Image: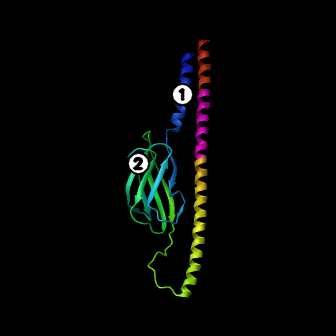
């Protein structure tokens, strides 16, 4: 009987560490589905637990890998510097990490770059062009506002996903505990029958 109790106690202590041992992406900059409207100089991925030095990532556009400089692993973060400004279009961050437990995990983050293309050399301006320029500026402001709203929406969705992931951990622990208790009861009944 004492052996069974000791076994159950050890199992209860070990279950949370098994369930929480695997790491996952907790946040990123840029985030999944984000529309980037400003010059992006660095990619930063933050994970739920510390990651190993072997972890890496690639930035891909239209099947071509865009070089990242100075890819670093610091505790829970994986970061890389973008060598030159990104052109408009769709990008994928492909990351591969090794968690503290040695378990390899990979994933992808999709984002879009939509930079304003009016960064050209200044030319002499006539009064008519000034009026047109003011209209263009107001349209650009509206575009930036809608992009900010989309960024806020995608950040909110990401936070909701993180909340759902965090909510699932206690559920897994509870399921494991219930299974162990049932196993302990069955084992206890079985040993009592043997003694009788």
Secondary structure, mark 2, is: strand
When the figure is inspected, residue 57 is found, relative to residue 184, above or below; the finding is below
Q: What's the magenta region?
A: 164-182
The image quarter in which residue 99 lies: top left
On the image, the x and y values in percent for residue 122 come to 45, 80
When the figure is inspected, residue 92 is found, relative to residue 193, above or below; the finding is below
171 drawn magenta: yes
Report the front residue among 193 and 101: 101
What's the CA distance linking mark 1 and mark 2? 33 Å
Q: Residues within 10 Å of mark 1 (few under 14, many from 20)?
A: some
Q: Which residue is mark 1?
A: 11
132 drawn magenta: no
When the figure is inspected, residue 66 is found, relative to residue 106, above or below; the finding is below
Among the two numbered marks 1 and 2 on one chain, the one whose residue lies closer to the N terminus: 1
Q: Which residue is mark 2?
A: 73
Which residue shows up at 54% across the image and 21% down it?
A: 6
| 83 relative position to 181: left or right | left
Q: Name the image quarter holding the C terminus.
A: top right
Circle number at residue 58: none
Q: Name the image quarter holding the N terminus.
A: top right
Q: Main secondary structure of the magenta part?
A: helix
Secondary structure, mark 1, is: helix
Report the front residue among 170 and 122: 122
On the image, the x and y values in percent for residue 156 come to 61, 55
Q: Nearer the viewer, mark 1 or mark 2?
A: 2
Which residue shows up at 50% across the image and 53% down it?
A: 28
The image quarter in which residue 16 lies: top right
Which residue shows up at 41% across the image and 48% down it?
A: 73
């Amino acid at each position: 009987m004492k052996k069974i109790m000791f076994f159950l106690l050890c199992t209860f202590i070990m279950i949370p560490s098994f369930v929480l041992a695997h790491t996952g992406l907790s946040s990123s900059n840029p985030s999944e589905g984000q529309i980037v409207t400003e010059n992006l100089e660095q990619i930063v991925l933050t994970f739920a637990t510390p990651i190993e030095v072997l972890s890496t990532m690639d930035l891909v556009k239209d099947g071509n890998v865009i070089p990242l400089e100075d890819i670093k692993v610091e505790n829970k973060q994986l970061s890389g510097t973008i060598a030159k400004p990104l052109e408009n279009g769709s990008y994928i961050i492909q990351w591969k990490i090794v968690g503290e437990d040695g378990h390899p995990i990979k994933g992808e983050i999709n984002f879009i770059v939509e930079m304003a293309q009016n960064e050209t050399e200044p030319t002499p301006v006539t009064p008519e062009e000034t009026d047109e320029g003011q209209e263009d500026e107001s349209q650009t402001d509206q575009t930036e506002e809608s992009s900010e709203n989309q960024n806020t929406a995608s950040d909110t969705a990401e936070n909701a996903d993180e909340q759902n992931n965090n909510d699932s951990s206690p559920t897994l622990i509870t399921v494991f505990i219930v299974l162990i208790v049932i196993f302990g009861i069955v084992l206890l009944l079985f040993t009592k029958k043997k003694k009788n």
